Image (cartoon, helix red, strand yellow):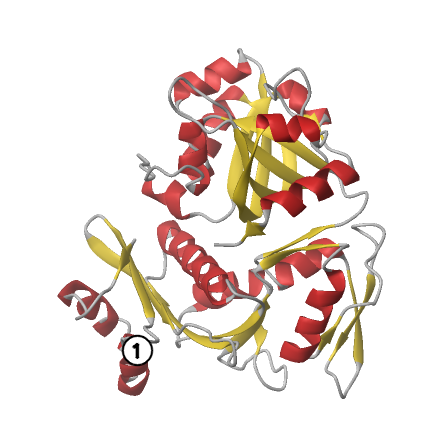
């Protein structure tokens, strides 16, 4: 993936010309913006050829909306992965300073873009007609806790007329009423997991939600989500751009990891590498046991383990596979001594998965200050 600075490369223009894009749309998508407000322009390549291009405008304090242009090659899995990654990047970028609305211009004859966008919470813009070309979505861009619930509630009302209940729900899967439209007042029943998808990137760290802290080696951290300060180098380019990741653990961790919960990553120290600190949090979308031979394929798609590493974890048996999304990195990594002080670690020094209670997770989030970019 490459940022475009200055003039657009000839290979990008060649790709865009093959997409049969209206000239007026193309001009808008290729605009560089101004020195004060530059547009973000990115393209993704595979086998030396451009496969996808996206551009969007930055948001400002007084204008919390952005228009996203996205074009991709249809008909291959890499194109679908690139679309999901670019949508995720744009959503995180525009909501970095607070909730924002992103408008997606969907080109004709690009069903994959529309399908990927709808899967992460985009909805038809305008009267709700599913045939409307353009889509829009609210991006929360933060971690909601009991402590900041009312602040995010007020921001969502002001931005998009979305009204959460005054009190946060007590259970993650319990449906509660979301009011859409300040004037119409349409009530919509939704659960926290569905709300997180609709407002992604977003996490709701609420009382009694299952959570776990797991160890991750430095190389895995930087490969899965660039969790270290070192650059990420992957043998498989597709694994690098897939927003939904997989974490592989010993079969014994299956009972520790709660379905629909949250996973905190502790980057262990490995020789001279690794910070020995909690560095990120993500949402658990699914966890299951898989045989060794299946894990090798799963890792190639969304993980970072090679065959030797898979066998080392499985010991000829099964591996616990955890699928994740909505990753938020920590502004302030929390080191082991501090993790022990807030009851997020014990004498075992986080060599395996450990459940966290609500108070411990709340204390960790308050210190860590997670962010979506």
Name the residue carrying label 1. Answer: 33
Q: Is 41 situated left or right of 129 in this image?
A: left
Q: Which residue is drawn at 28% across and 72% down?
A: 19
Q: Residues within 10 Å of mark 1 (few under 14, many from 20)?
A: some
Image location (x, y in percent) of residue 86: 41, 59
Image location (x, y in percent) of residue 11: 17, 63
- Tell me the quarter of the picture where residue 106 sits: bottom left
Seen in the picture, residue 122 relative to 326 is either above or below; the reply is below
Tell which of 24 and 225 is nearer to you. 225
Tell which of 366 and 289 is nearer to you. 366
Please identify the residue farthest to the top as the structure is shown.
Answer: 315
Seen in the picture, residue 225 relative to 80 is either above or below; the reply is above
- Tell me the quarter of the picture where residue 363 sits: top right
One can see residue 46 in this view: yes
Seen in the picture, residue 101 relative to 83 is either above or below; the reply is below
- Tell me the quarter of the picture where residue 73 sits: bottom left
Q: Residue at x 77, y 68 (%)?
A: 164
Q: Is 174 situated left or right of 94 in this image?
A: right
Secondary structure type for disc 1: loop
Q: Which residue is drawn at 66% across and 72% down?
A: 155
């Amino acid at each position: 993936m490459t940022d475009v600075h200055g003039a657009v490369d000839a290979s990008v223009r060649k790709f865009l010309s093959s997409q049969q894009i209206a000239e007026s749309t193309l001009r808008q998508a290729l605009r560089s913006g101004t020195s004060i407000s530059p547009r973000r322009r990115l393209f993704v390549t595979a086998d030396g050829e451009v496969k996808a291009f996206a551009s969007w405008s930055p948001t400002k304090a007084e204008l919390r909306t952005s228009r996203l242009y996205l074009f991709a090659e249809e008909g291959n899995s890499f194109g679908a992965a690139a679309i999901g990654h670019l949508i995720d990047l744009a959503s995180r970028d525009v909501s970095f300073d607070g909730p924002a609305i992103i408008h997606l211009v969907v080109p004709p004859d690009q069903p994959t873009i529309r399908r990927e966008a709808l899967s992460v919470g985009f909805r038809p813009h305008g009267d709700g007609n599913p045939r409307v070309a353009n889509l829009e979505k609210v991006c929360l861009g933060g971690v909601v806790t009991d402590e900041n619930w009312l602040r995010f509630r007020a921001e969502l009302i002001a931005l998009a007329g979305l009204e959460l209940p005054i009190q946060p729900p007590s259970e993650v899967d319990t449906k509660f009423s979301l009011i859409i439209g300040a004037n119409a007042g349409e009530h919509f029943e939704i659960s926290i997991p569905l709300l997180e998808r609709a407002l992604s990137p977003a996490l709701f760290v609420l009382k009694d939600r299952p959570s776990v802290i797991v160890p991750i080696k430095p190389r895995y951290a930087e490969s899965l989500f660039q969790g270290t300060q070192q650059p990420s180098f992957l043998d498989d380019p597709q694994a690098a751009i897939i927003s939904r990741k997989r974490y592989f653990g010993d079969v014994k961790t299956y009972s520790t990891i709660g379905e629909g919960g949250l996973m905190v990553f502790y980057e262990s120290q490995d020789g001279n590498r690794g910070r020995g600190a909690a560095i990120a949090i993500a949402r658990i979308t699914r966890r299951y046991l898989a045989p060794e031979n299946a894990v090798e394929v799963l890792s190639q798609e969304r993980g970072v383990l090679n065959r030797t590493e898979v066998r080392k974890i499985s010991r000829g048996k099964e591996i616990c596979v955890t699928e994740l999304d909505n990753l938020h990195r920590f502004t302030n990594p929390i080191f082991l001594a501090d993790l022990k002080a807030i009851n997020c670690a014990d004498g075992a020094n986080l060599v395996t998965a450990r459940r966290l209670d609500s108070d411990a997770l709340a204390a960790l989030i308050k210190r860590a200050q997670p962010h979506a970019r």
